[in-house]
Image (spheres, rainbow, N blue to C red):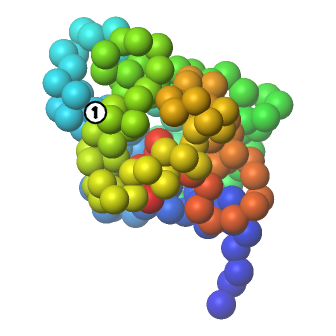
Amino acid sequence: MARFDPIMRRLRQLFAVLDTDDDGFVTWEDHQRMVDAYAEHYSLARDDARLTALAAAYWAQWLGLLAKSTPGRFRLSQDEYVAAHRAVGYDTDRPDLLENLAKALFAVLDSDGDKRISSDEFAAYLAFRGVSGEDAPLVFQRLDLDRDSYLSQREIARSLRAFHLNNDGLHAPGGIFLGIH
């Protein structure tokens, strides 16, 4: 049995989450279905700036992956997806991809617009993602790096970066912002 490093294993999990139609490939349509799920759960209109920013962040992610895959491909198998993700260069070539995603996610989750995500807002997000309420305090605590009892956009960005770049274990808490729990 092949052994995968933690980043590869997390990316394989991410592929499974994004392959929303279970056809063995990830496409832009799969990403769009993720955006649509946010729109439905948070009751966001198509022209809501938060939703358009989220769609733009997912679109940029998708284009970044396509740029690192075989030319002419518009759907990626799991192996192609993982290889493209690893090649994107989130820490050097394209750090903006994760920053823009963090900014967009933050804007959606900050439902009261106070520029911080409370434990209640986070618990509502976890319910959307299908995570039990009893796990919410532990997950929140792992993400709240400055221990101020709120999540900032910076903490979300750091958790997304750790998910994609840190080779320190399978359960990087940033995966929760990508649908992995």
Q: Residue furthest bottom?
A: 1
Q: Position of residue 77 (x, y in %)?
A: 50, 59
Q: Position of residue 129 (x, y in %)?
A: 32, 49
Q: Quadrant of residue 55?
A: top left
Q: In the picture, which quadrant includes the C terminus?
A: bottom left
In the image, what residue occupies the spot 79% across and 29% down?
A: 93
| Residue type highlighted by circle 1 | Tyr
In the image, what residue occupies the spot 18% across and 16% down?
A: 45
Please indicate, yes or no, whether residue 100 appears anywhere in the rendered image.
Answer: yes
In the image, what residue occupies the spot 30% across and 54% down?
A: 133
Q: In the picture, which quadrant includes the N terminus?
A: bottom right
In the image, what residue occupies the spot 49% across and 55% down?
A: 138
Count of marks placed on residues: 1
Q: Is residue 78 above or below residue 122?
A: below
Q: Which residue is mark 1?
A: 38
Along the line of sight, the residue nearer the viewer: 11 or 22: 11
Would you call the spot at circle 1 few (<14 residues within 10 Å), some (14-19), or many (20 or more)?
many
Q: Is residue 166 above or below residue 66?
A: below
Q: Is residue 179 above or below residue 171?
A: above
Please indicate, yes or no, whether residue 56 appears anywhere in the rendered image.
Answer: no
